[in-house]
Amino acid sequence: MTHHPDSIRMNKAISDSGYCSRRKADTLIEQGRVTLNGEKVSLGDRAMPGDEIRIDGKLITENDNLVYIALNKPVGITCTTDTRVDGNVVDFIGHKERIFHVGRLDKPSEGLLLMTNDGDIVNKILRAGNDHEKEYIVKTDRPITADFIKKMGNGVWLEELETLTKKCEVEQISRLVFRIVLVQGLNRQIRRMCEYLGYEVVELKRIRIMNITLGDLPVGKWRDLTTKELQDLKDAVSGSKNVPQVDRITSTGGRRRKK
C-alpha cells in the first residue's frame, strides 16, 4: 500500500493545526463531523498540503498564524513535506509553522520557491488554466541559436507527456544562457523542451513567480513576503476558484473520484 509522499493521515493533519489530539480527531471523524474539500472523511483517509479541512463546517486553519515566505532554494534540496526524505525543504527551512511549498522546483534546480500555510492561496496559484507567470534563467550545454529561441517560444511537443507546450516569452541573454517565462507547470518542462531540441540544461534558476521576484536573496536564505507583495499576489489570484490540485487520497492508496 503506497501513499503520495506529501500526504498525511487526517488525524495528524487536524492535530498539527492545534485543534485537538489525534485521538480526539479520530472521534470527530467517526462522528462524521470532519470534511475534506467538502466531502466527509473516514478513518485512515489522508490529506495533502493545501487541502481544506473543516470540523462542523469551521475551517480548522482559520485561526492559524498565516505565513508567506520566499526561499532561494539551493540545488540538492527536494520539494517535499515528507521529512523522511533527506534534504527535504521543510527541514531545510526549519520554520516553526507547518508550511508547504507552492508548486515545485526540481532537485537539480535552484531559485525562488514560495512557501506558506495558507491552503486557499496555494490552490488558487496552482490551479490549472490560471496562466500565472514563472520566469527562469537557463544555461545550456552548447551555444544557443535563433532557431532554438524561436522553437522554444512557439511551443515544443513533449512526446512522453503527449502535449504541446504553450507559447511563451524566450530571450537569449548570452552564448549559452536564455530567459524564459512559462505559464504552465509541466513536470521538468524546461528540461524536456531543451532535450527535444537537442540541448541539455546545465543550470536552471527560477527568478520570479507572478509578482514575487528573487532579487538579491542569497542562496539558501528565505524572507517573509512584504505587505505589498502579499496584497498584489492575493489580488492576482482573487478570480481563481479554490480547486484542489490533487484528488483526495484514500487509505487504500487510490484516489477517490470526484462527484
Image: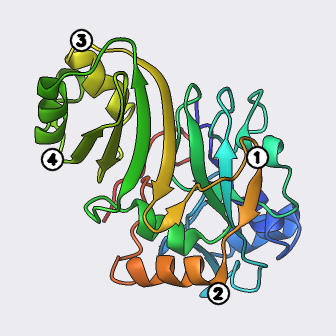
* Other-residue count near label 4 (Cα within 10 Å), few / some / many at <14 / 14–19 / ≥20: some
Tell which of 83 and 250 is nearer to you.
Answer: 83
Residues at marks 4 and 2, CA–CA distance in whole angstroms:
45 Å
Which numbered tag is attached to residue 198?
Answer: 3
* Other-residue count near label 3 (Cα within 10 Å), few / some / many at <14 / 14–19 / ≥20: few
Which numbered tag is attached to residue 56?
Answer: 2
Could you say whether the residue bearing mark 1 is in a helix, strand or loop?
helix
Q: For mark 1, what is the residue?
A: 90
Residue 157 left/right relative to 34? left
Q: Badges 3 and 4: C-beta atoms under 8 Å apart?
A: no
Q: Position of residue 218 (x, y in %)?
A: 73, 46
Q: Position of residue 167 (x, y in %)?
A: 15, 47
Residue 71's place in the image compared with 124, above or below, is: above
Say which residue appears at 48% left-offset and 55% top-offset. 208
- Mark positioned earlier in the residue sequence (3 or 4): 4
Q: For mark 4, what is the residue?
A: 167
Question: Which residue type does callout 3 highlight?
Answer: Gly
Residues at marks 4 and 1, CA–CA distance in whole angstroms:
34 Å
Residues at marks 3 and 4, CA–CA distance in whole angstroms:
19 Å
Could you say whether the residue bearing mark 2 is in a helix, strand or loop?
loop
Residue 98 left/right relative to 247? right
Q: Position of residue 83 (x, y in %)?
A: 78, 38
Question: Which residue type does callout 2 highlight?
Answer: Asp
Could you say whether the residue bearing mark 3 is in a helix, strand or loop?
loop
- Mark positioned earlier in the residue sequence (1 or 2): 2
- Mark positioned earlier in the residue sequence (2 or 3): 2
Question: Which residue type does callout 1 highlight?
Answer: Val
